[in-house]
Amino acid sequence: MHNQNEWFPSALNAWDWDTFVVDARALFSRWRALTASEAPWTEMAADDAAGCMRSVISELVNEAHEPCDGSHDWRLLLAAFEHGRFRRLQGCSSAILTREFDALRTGLRAVLGDTLISPSVVADALVVLEPELVAAGEAAMAGWEGMCQRPQGADS
Protein backbone atom coordinates (compact mmCIF):
# COMPACT_ATOMS: atom_id res chain seq x y z
CA MET A 1 0.00 0.00 0.00
CA HIS A 2 1.22 3.48 -0.82
CA ASN A 3 1.78 5.92 1.97
CA GLN A 4 1.15 9.64 1.93
CA ASN A 5 4.74 10.56 1.13
CA GLU A 6 4.85 8.35 -1.95
CA TRP A 7 1.85 10.04 -3.53
CA PHE A 8 2.59 13.67 -3.03
CA PRO A 9 5.56 15.73 -2.10
CA SER A 10 5.74 18.05 0.87
CA ALA A 11 5.43 21.06 -1.42
CA LEU A 12 1.65 20.70 -1.52
CA ASN A 13 -0.45 23.16 0.42
CA ALA A 14 2.08 25.90 -0.31
CA TRP A 15 -0.30 27.83 -2.55
CA ASP A 16 -2.54 30.65 -1.33
CA TRP A 17 -5.88 29.69 -2.85
CA ASP A 18 -7.58 32.82 -1.53
CA THR A 19 -5.58 35.06 -3.85
CA PHE A 20 -5.50 32.83 -6.93
CA VAL A 21 -8.47 31.20 -8.62
CA VAL A 22 -8.65 28.89 -11.61
CA ASP A 23 -12.16 28.41 -13.01
CA ALA A 24 -12.80 24.67 -12.76
CA ARG A 25 -15.52 24.81 -15.41
CA ALA A 26 -13.23 26.55 -17.86
CA LEU A 27 -10.47 24.01 -17.20
CA PHE A 28 -12.85 21.08 -17.61
CA SER A 29 -14.17 22.55 -20.88
CA ARG A 30 -10.62 23.02 -22.15
CA TRP A 31 -9.70 19.47 -21.14
CA ARG A 32 -12.78 18.11 -22.94
CA ALA A 33 -11.94 20.14 -26.05
CA LEU A 34 -8.43 18.68 -26.03
CA THR A 35 -9.66 15.09 -25.73
CA ALA A 36 -13.05 15.16 -27.49
CA SER A 37 -11.77 14.64 -31.01
CA GLU A 38 -9.58 11.64 -30.18
CA ALA A 39 -10.34 7.97 -29.67
CA PRO A 40 -11.46 6.55 -27.31
CA TRP A 41 -13.25 9.70 -26.09
CA THR A 42 -15.07 10.13 -29.43
CA GLU A 43 -16.68 6.75 -28.91
CA MET A 44 -17.88 7.39 -25.35
CA ALA A 45 -21.04 8.96 -23.99
CA ALA A 46 -20.30 12.39 -22.46
CA ASP A 47 -20.45 11.17 -18.86
CA ASP A 48 -18.25 8.18 -19.65
CA ALA A 49 -15.77 10.40 -21.49
CA ALA A 50 -15.50 12.65 -18.44
CA GLY A 51 -14.96 9.77 -16.04
CA CYS A 52 -14.10 11.34 -12.68
CA MET A 53 -12.11 14.18 -14.24
CA ARG A 54 -14.63 16.80 -13.09
CA SER A 55 -13.82 15.84 -9.50
CA VAL A 56 -10.09 15.71 -10.19
CA ILE A 57 -10.18 19.22 -11.65
CA SER A 58 -12.37 20.56 -8.87
CA GLU A 59 -9.91 19.31 -6.26
CA LEU A 60 -6.84 20.30 -8.26
CA VAL A 61 -7.90 23.94 -8.37
CA ASN A 62 -9.53 23.76 -4.92
CA GLU A 63 -12.84 24.96 -6.31
CA ALA A 64 -14.47 24.74 -2.86
CA HIS A 65 -11.71 26.93 -1.34
CA GLU A 66 -11.06 24.35 1.35
CA PRO A 67 -8.38 25.12 3.93
CA CYS A 68 -4.98 23.63 3.23
CA ASP A 69 -5.19 21.11 6.05
CA GLY A 70 -4.37 17.97 4.10
CA SER A 71 -7.94 16.82 3.48
CA HIS A 72 -7.96 18.66 0.15
CA ASP A 73 -4.94 16.63 -0.95
CA TRP A 74 -6.66 13.37 -0.04
CA ARG A 75 -9.77 14.35 -1.96
CA LEU A 76 -7.63 15.09 -5.01
CA LEU A 77 -5.87 11.73 -4.73
CA LEU A 78 -9.11 9.87 -4.18
CA ALA A 79 -10.76 11.51 -7.20
CA ALA A 80 -7.72 10.67 -9.33
CA PHE A 81 -7.61 7.11 -8.01
CA GLU A 82 -11.29 6.63 -8.83
CA HIS A 83 -10.76 8.14 -12.29
CA GLY A 84 -7.99 5.64 -13.01
CA ARG A 85 -10.12 2.77 -11.73
CA PHE A 86 -13.04 3.91 -13.89
CA ARG A 87 -10.82 4.05 -16.98
CA ARG A 88 -9.54 0.53 -16.28
CA LEU A 89 -13.12 -0.75 -16.00
CA GLN A 90 -13.81 0.90 -19.36
CA GLY A 91 -10.94 -1.04 -20.87
CA CYS A 92 -8.79 2.04 -21.53
CA SER A 93 -5.05 1.63 -21.70
CA SER A 94 -2.63 3.26 -19.31
CA ALA A 95 -1.47 5.39 -22.26
CA ILE A 96 -4.97 6.90 -22.43
CA LEU A 97 -4.76 7.79 -18.75
CA THR A 98 -1.37 9.42 -19.33
CA ARG A 99 -2.81 11.32 -22.31
CA GLU A 100 -5.63 12.65 -20.12
CA PHE A 101 -3.22 14.12 -17.60
CA ASP A 102 -1.10 15.58 -20.40
CA ALA A 103 -4.26 17.23 -21.73
CA LEU A 104 -5.03 18.48 -18.23
CA ARG A 105 -1.59 20.15 -18.05
CA THR A 106 -2.09 21.70 -21.49
CA GLY A 107 -5.57 22.88 -20.55
CA LEU A 108 -4.35 24.37 -17.29
CA ARG A 109 -1.62 26.29 -19.10
CA ALA A 110 -4.19 27.58 -21.61
CA VAL A 111 -6.77 28.58 -18.98
CA LEU A 112 -4.13 30.39 -16.96
CA GLY A 113 -2.90 32.07 -20.13
CA ASP A 114 -6.43 33.31 -20.85
CA THR A 115 -6.44 35.30 -17.62
CA LEU A 116 -5.09 38.79 -17.20
CA ILE A 117 -2.23 37.67 -14.97
CA SER A 118 1.33 38.07 -16.17
CA PRO A 119 3.15 35.24 -17.92
CA SER A 120 5.58 34.99 -15.00
CA VAL A 121 2.69 34.42 -12.57
CA VAL A 122 1.28 31.79 -14.95
CA ALA A 123 4.68 30.08 -14.97
CA ASP A 124 4.85 30.24 -11.16
CA ALA A 125 1.34 28.78 -10.85
CA LEU A 126 2.27 25.90 -13.14
CA VAL A 127 5.37 25.19 -11.05
CA VAL A 128 3.28 25.17 -7.88
CA LEU A 129 0.57 22.95 -9.38
CA GLU A 130 2.98 20.48 -11.00
CA PRO A 131 3.51 18.39 -7.82
CA GLU A 132 -0.27 18.05 -7.46
CA LEU A 133 -0.61 17.08 -11.13
CA VAL A 134 2.13 14.48 -10.72
CA ALA A 135 0.56 13.12 -7.52
CA ALA A 136 -2.88 12.98 -9.15
CA GLY A 137 -1.44 11.19 -12.19
CA GLU A 138 0.28 8.64 -9.95
CA ALA A 139 -2.91 8.09 -7.96
CA ALA A 140 -4.87 7.64 -11.18
CA MET A 141 -2.33 5.11 -12.42
CA ALA A 142 -2.52 3.27 -9.08
CA GLY A 143 -6.29 3.11 -9.47
CA TRP A 144 -5.90 1.89 -13.04
CA GLU A 145 -3.38 -0.75 -12.02
CA GLY A 146 -5.56 -1.88 -9.14
CA MET A 147 -2.33 -2.25 -7.19
CA CYS A 148 -3.60 -0.86 -3.95
CA GLN A 149 -6.70 0.18 -2.14
CA ARG A 150 -8.07 3.68 -2.02
CA PRO A 151 -5.60 6.16 -0.53
CA GLN A 152 -5.22 5.67 3.20
CA GLY A 153 -7.05 8.38 5.12
CA ALA A 154 -9.26 9.24 2.15
CA ASP A 155 -12.46 8.54 4.07
CA SER A 156 -11.67 10.97 6.85
Image (cartoon, rainbow, N blue to C red):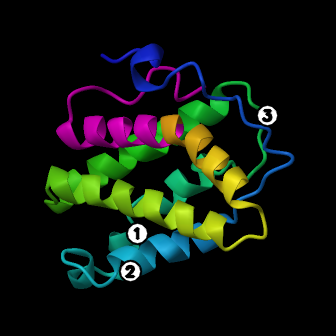
Q: Amino acid at mark 1?
A: Ala
Q: Amino acid at mark 3?
A: Pro
Corner quadrant of residue 69:
top right
Task: Check the picture and name the quadrant holding the C terminus.
Answer: top right
Label 1 vs label 3: CA separation? Answer: 27 Å
Residue 18 image point, x, y percent: 86, 45
Q: Amino acid at mark 2?
A: Ala
Label 2 vs label 1: CA separation? Answer: 6 Å
Badge number at residue 133:
none
Residue, disc 1: 50
Badge number at residue 67:
3
> For the point 46% across and 15% down, which residue is it?
5
Q: Nearer the viewer, residue 101 or 51?
A: 101
Badge number at residue 46:
2
Label 2 vs label 3: CA separation? Answer: 32 Å
Residue 50 image point, x, y percent: 40, 69
For residue 140, say whether it is visible: yes
Left or right: 148 as drawn, with respect to 7: left
Could you classify mark 3 by the number of other residues whose Cα lies within 10 Å: few (under 14), some (14-19), or many (20 or more)? few
> For the point 30% across and 48% down, which residue is it?
84
Left or right: 15 as drawn, with respect to 129: right
Counting residues from the start of the chain, the first of labels 1 and 3 encountered is 1
* SS category of the residue bearing label 2: helix
> For the point 54% across and 62% down, which residue is it?
109
* SS category of the residue bearing label 3: loop
Q: How many marks?
A: 3
Residue 3 image point, x, y percent: 41, 14
Identify the magenta region: 132-156
